[in-house]
Image (cartoon, grey):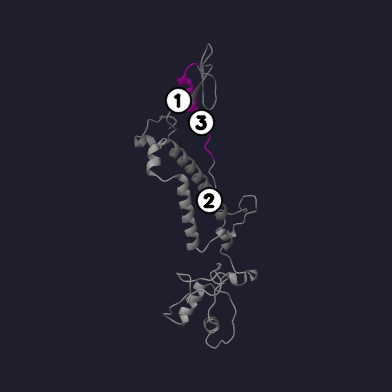
Amino acid sequence: MSETPSAEKDAGLSRTCLRCGYVHVSRDARAVGRFGPTVTYVAAHGGPQRATRAEAEADECAWRRNRPSPAPVVRAAAEPTAPSTVASVVDAGDGQASAGELFPAPLMETAARAKAWHDFLAQLRLSLMVWEVDREVRAECEHVLVWLRRCQSELTRMGYRSNLRSPDDEVRPWRPSDGDSRCQECDRTYVPWFVDNWLWNHVIGGPACTSDPGGYLCPRCFMVRAEQVYPGLVWRVFPEWSPTRVLPPGGSDA
């Protein structure tokens, strides 16, 4: 129970003291020498030892009435500051955000992934224990390892759908060392491919272009550009030469 200001007296929420304006509670006085031959009582904020709790509570009541009023707090006007952005957060390498940053998104994301991984491991251990001790679970549910393999397959499909097939396939700006393995528009890697020179020159360099205008695009980004030049264009994709020949069903291309 907490001390209640006298405003609650008028609202009828509690019984406040008519002298100090607060509710007298048990902690207003504490016992001294409880396990000795004589027990005395002292007010919570200090004072002489009293023979009864009521006297010590009266000392506490008097202290409340006579204590000096605190000086008003004058708050200085806050200086306007630029809002913190995710891009401006810098990790110094010690796991801490740079000074002054209020939203270290990269660090928060790293911590969230670590927590998700630990939660997953805890659930996995629990699933293994339940599988071992519960006959009904073994009869109705797939084995935990089979479930894990299925989860791995789902993650693999998610990676292909997002064009992130391995940790090396990160989305980042093109670098000269990437050559023709990374798109300069979507910043993703792509498989080797090509189109006729005239089509590439026309789409990338314009109608008057007769030589290679340069650049590296993935099939999807090039198709988007080509459809702007040739609306309604339909694509046919077929394999080119490779060390291992791609043959139709039956094993013959005759």
- Disc 1 or disc 2, which is closer to the eye? 2
**What secondary structure is marked by label 2?**
helix
Estimate the spatial distance between the alpha carbons at disc 1 and disc 2, rounded to whole Å: 48 Å
Judge whether residue 82 can be spotted in this image: no
Q: Which mark is residue 66?
A: 3
Mark 1 residue type: Ser
Instruction: Say which residue label 1 marks.
Output: 26
Q: Identify the residue shown where x is 37% and y is 43%.
A: 140
In the picture shown, does residue 233 fall above or below 94? Answer: below
The stretch in magenta equals: 51-70
Residue 73 sits inside the magenta stretch: no
State if disc 2 and disc 1 touch (CB < 8 Å).
no
Estimate the spatial distance between the alpha carbons at disc 2 and disc 3, rounded to whole Å: 56 Å
What is the residue that sits farthest to the top in this orientation?
37
Instruction: Say which residue label 2 marks.
Output: 113
Which tag, 1 or 2, sits closer to the chain's start? 1
Viewport quadrant of the N terminus: top left
Query: Pointer 1: residues within 10 angstroms few (<14), some, or many (20+)?
Result: few
Q: Position of residue 197 (x, y in %)?
A: 55, 83
Query: Pointer 3: residues within 10 angstroms few (<14), some, or many (20+)?
Result: few
Q: Position of residue 180 (x, y in %)?
A: 60, 72
